[in-house]
Amino acid sequence: MLRTKLVLLGLAATLVFSAVASSSAFAAAETRYFVEKTEVSAANALEGTSGLAKLESTIAGTKIIIECQKDAATGEIEKEGKSKGEIKFTECGELMQRNTAREKEKIAKCAVENITFKFIDLLVPGPGGSGEDEFKPASGSTFVTIVVGGTGCNATFKGSYEVEGTQICANPEGEVELVLHDIWCSSTGSKLKLHKELASFTSLESLQLTSHKKWS
């Protein structure tokens, strides 16, 4: 239900929250989930989709872009602002090279395989007392291994590349009780590396409970 037809990820992604700030500006904020005004005490199934998701990094000194046209996410939201799930990015096409800030071109015959990974996330305090989601690998330090291949793909780019690190995503309406929440992942929240090179992820993920109940 993504209307932008962004980015792995993250990643990502990807869950919603309600952040309740402490009365003290110096105390840590509380993070909790609510379903129809009742605080979550057990896992609630979640599902979501996005449109275009994009990962930018460097391979062999070349600025590259991986774009996937859609994804499907499944998972659970749990108490205390914790959640987990799996995302599958599809229609990733060919690896692309960034020529200028606005121009890019395909690296001929270097296809990017569909990308599937598991994640965990935790609500964390954001700017001004708001809440954000921090996505991490379900285990270890690697989110996913991205495979670039295909007959005729240049050996410079062909291979398997690990994505490591974390991704922070915003939910501007996280404290509003809605059926559908949009999770924004941007490059400013990326603490990622692709094959040890700095990477950034952008995406807009739309999430809802499988029960279609309102949540915040």
Image (tube, rainbow, N blue to C red):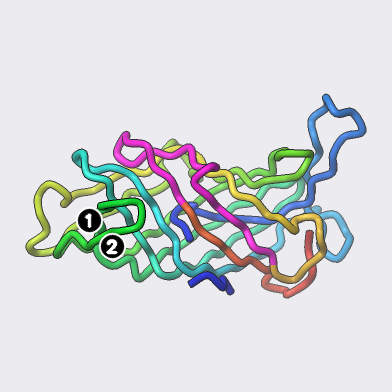
| Numbered tag placed on residue 148 in the rendering | 1
Q: Position of residue 96 (x, y in %)?
A: 26, 58
Is disc 2 in contact with disc 1, using a CB cutoff of under 8 Å?
A: yes
Amino acid type of the residue that numbered disc 1 sits on in the rendered structure: Val
* Residue shown at the point (85%, 66%) measured from the top left: 36
**Toward the viewer: 74 or 71?**
71
Which residues lie in the magenta part?
Answer: 181-201
Q: Quadrant of residue 46?
A: bottom right
**Toward the viewer: 120 or 156?**
156
Is 210 drawn above or below residue 159 in the view shown?
A: below
| Numbered tag placed on residue 111 in the rendering | none
Q: Label 1: few (<14), some or many (≥20) within 10 Å?
A: many
Q: Residue furthest right?
A: 23
Q: Report the predominant secondary structure element of the magenta stretch.
A: strand
Instruction: Residue under label 2, please give it.
Output: 113
Tell me: 215 left or right of 47.
right
Amino acid type of the residue that numbered disc 2 sits on in the rendered structure: Glu
Tell me: 23 left or right of 9.
right
